[in-house]
Image (spheres, grey):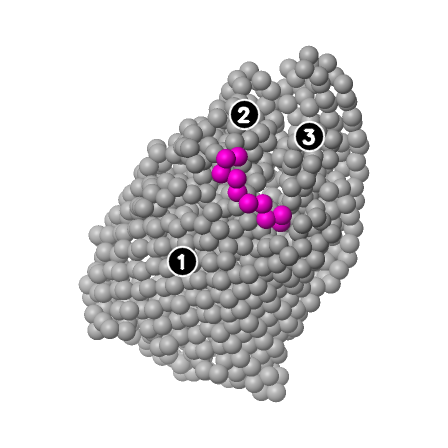
Amino acid sequence: MPLTLTQTLTLQKNMNHLPIKPGYCRLKTLLAGFSILFFLSQHLSAQSHTGVVADENNAALTGVQVINPENGTSILTGPDGTFVIESTKEKLHLVFCKEGYTIIEEDITASKPVTIILQQITELNEVVIERNREKLFALTHLKDIEGASIYAGKKTEVIEVDKLTANKAVNNMRQVYAQVVGLTFNENSDGGLQLNIGGRGLNPNRTSNFNTRQNGYDISADVLGYPESYYTPPTEGVERIQVIRGAASLQYGTQFGGLVNFVMHKPSAKPIEITLRNTAGSYGMYSNFTSLSGTAGKFSYYTFFNYKQGDGFRPNAQYNSRNFFINLNYAFTPKTSLHFDYTMFDYLAKQPGGLTDYMFNQDMFQSNRTRNWFDVNWNLYSLRFNHAFTDDARLEVQLFGLNASRSALGYLTNRVATADVPGTVRDLIKGEFVNGGAEAKFLQQYNLKGQKSAFMVGAKYYRARNTATQGPGSSDSGADFSFANTEFPNYTSQSDYTYPNQNIALFAENMFRLSPVFTVTPGIRFENISTKADGYWRRINTDQAGNVILDILEQENIEKNRNFLLAGIGFSYKPSAKTEWYANVSQNYRSVTFNDIRTASPGLAIDPTITDEKGFTFDLGLRGKIDDRFSFDTNIYALYYNDKIGEYLAPNPNGSAAVVRYRSNIGTALTYGWEMLADWNISNTFFKENEKFLWTAFINNALTGSEYLQSDAPNIEGNMVEFVPLVNLKAGTTAGYGNFKASLQLTYLSEQFTDSGNTVTDANDNTYGIFGQIPSYYVADFSASYTWRNFKLEGSINNFTNNYYFTRRATGYPGPGILPSDPRTFYVTLQVKL
């Protein structure tokens, strides 16, 4: 029944006192240009779904989350336990949940107030809480439509961080991403300060083949020109991690890998909630994570500060970092909200450098670099508007910006075994990143032949002006990031570049629901990209007496402008409520980066004619659940690269006798495979009556093949693609009783090549360390936790079999050479929640 104007105004007044939990609510922003008539028309067509939530003693419950699982939105009940939801629908299926109470699902009819009774869970413990989280996750995880985004027919995965029994203090990637199939990692001993994710033949280095976001906005150095992530949100501050594979290119950008989006914790429904976490671990590791959050009427906030330090397991491997985050939210109405985020991340690390194969096999704990340093300062800003015109029409607008820098200082010769000599020149490479932009998406659901379909359209504007400078560093041993041109006027390699970049993108997708069980989702994305490099490089050669015999200075002004259209289509078939077949094919594109245009790495040279990569990704899979006992997701995929950028061994083009890794468009490559994730809830299968007992097990396996189909470079065609292990297996189990939980996990990867020439490892190489394979390895991790009242004790033994292995051969900083992974390490965390 339509509301009168008086009823509408009264309804709005009554709702003003209701606390809103941001991030779930369908909210409305004040948009200039909308007339009063249009505003009223939206409300006059809506119907009220009202009620009160109480406990078994009929006492009103405040802060109960009322979720509409169809679109993922939610509100919280007010102080008197009441809720009001406006909708154009006559009947809504709603979910009611509050920590410490059972989860209830009810059908609510408009204009018929209801009373919902939640029963308190007796003997509340961690296992019961996790079981409730699993039920809630099944209702709220990525659906065909969420907010203003369409995910139908895409390969999507969600990590619920709070459910993990893992070492969160150091962002242990093996554990955090254990149930995301096919991922590979570069593991560095730096306290988890940098994220290095790859997979399907994509280089893991700083997650540069994924579009990396936090709360939906970009966090990498430069989305197109330098898509490397020097900042990684601390796992302790993250609520969930969304991973959308290559088809994410149509909505989120052109990267082959897809999207990794860190969704930060939401504010507490309490006026104030404090969480303190202190972690101590092996090799001098210490971390303090302190968060503060709360809700007061229409205003809510979440903020944390994370301090971290450690010595590393090798000499010259100390680090310390500071990370501050604040999220402020204001709900004008249940349909309109404004959100502001600010992130500061700063860290300084001493780098022990790389090793040759001979050095690694002799003693992986050694270091012959005593003056290598790395410094990062990251500042991120975001302002987001969310507005729901109706249940079926939603607008999301965000402004975002980055002001950041990173500096690398040290002795970077590609002859790794040559020890650093105190008092000599060091290489200094500095980068400044200033960029920002705006992104808007509008989604409209509509009826097509009696079925609910949806159309999404969006646009993004991005502009950056970044700089990169290389020159002589001081002869001192400390972290002095100022150029020493006076001390070393004949420094061999100097450069100074400015990279002004601009990107305008338009994108659209339409989910056609052709029947209750079948959807087709075509999409397009138009890109206008301008990549520029303006600056100079200088090379000076001297004889053994220090006399200059060559001095070349070359000015460069490179500009690459291009327009292109990406297309894709997805299919979803759901023969039952718990089973789905999905398929998607999407074009991908990756722009050449700063490092592809000009490099500062002594062990790497660049083809001056290098150009962008093009190709597509394809997924076909089946996912589903069998009751509450077993869930699975299995798929086959193909990733096709044209003009793939890769590296192979070649003489240094500068005329020297040294052999380098030469980066170029080396040809056409294909990566393909079968991925499978299965999760078995053993306790729900055999011990369902015992709510205090939890036992689950999972297996995550990817079998991957690859081949260079065509190449003009010598000895490449027919080779395997680099960074592709044939077997990528992770398996584990978690068991708990009452307030105690423990998990055990095994990770195994078969050997993989690191260059397109498939160079085989020479165990006796004591010069370079940058040529050869990454040998197969396995790692086992154990974690446990115990909760008592407001206290929680966590502990981890990572790599408890103490295997010596590595996952990366660095061609430049922080190597060059082999970078060993951590041996056996211990961690213990004490958490207090107030």
Which residue corresponds to mark 2? Answer: 418
Say which residue label 3 marks.
657
Q: CA distance from mark 2 to mark 1?
A: 38 Å
Q: Is residue 761 magenta?
A: yes
Residue 749 appears at what percent x and percent y?
A: 45, 53
Q: What type is the residue that disc 3 sits on?
A: Ala
Q: Measured along the vertical axis of the image, is residue 441 above or below residue 407?
A: below
Magenta region, residue range: 756-765
Mark toward the viewer: 3 or 2? 3
Q: Judge depth for marks 2 and 1 and give the one in front.
A: 2
Q: Position of residue 195 (x, y in %)?
A: 50, 46
Tell me which residue sits at (54%, 54%) in the image: 724
Residue 304 visible in the displayed image: no
The percent coordinates of residue 635 (x first, y second) are: 51, 69
Which residue is label 1 attached to?
A: 730
Count residues near mark 1 (Cα–Cα under 10 Å), then give few for <14, some for 14-19, many for 20+: many
Label located before the other in sequence (3 or 2): 2
**Can you tell which quarter of the image residue 278 is in?**
top left
Viewer-nearest residue: 814 or 273: 814
Q: Residues within 10 Å of mark 2 (few under 14, many from 20)?
A: some
Point 40% across, 74% down: residue? 625
Vertical placement of 135 versus 349: above or below?
Answer: below
Residue type marked 2: Thr
Q: Residue at x 64, y 15 (%)?
A: 487
Q: Which residue in the rendered view is the most extreme toward the top?
A: 545
Q: Secondary structure at mark 1?
A: strand
Question: Residue 631, can we see it?
Answer: yes
Q: On the rendered structure, is 517 left or right of 598?
A: left
| Residue at (27% x, 52% y) in the render | 785
Secondary structure at numbered mark 2: loop
**Label 1 – label 3 distance at C-alpha:** 44 Å
**Dot 3 alpha-carbon crowd within 10 angstroms: few under 14, some 14 to 19, many 20 or more:** few
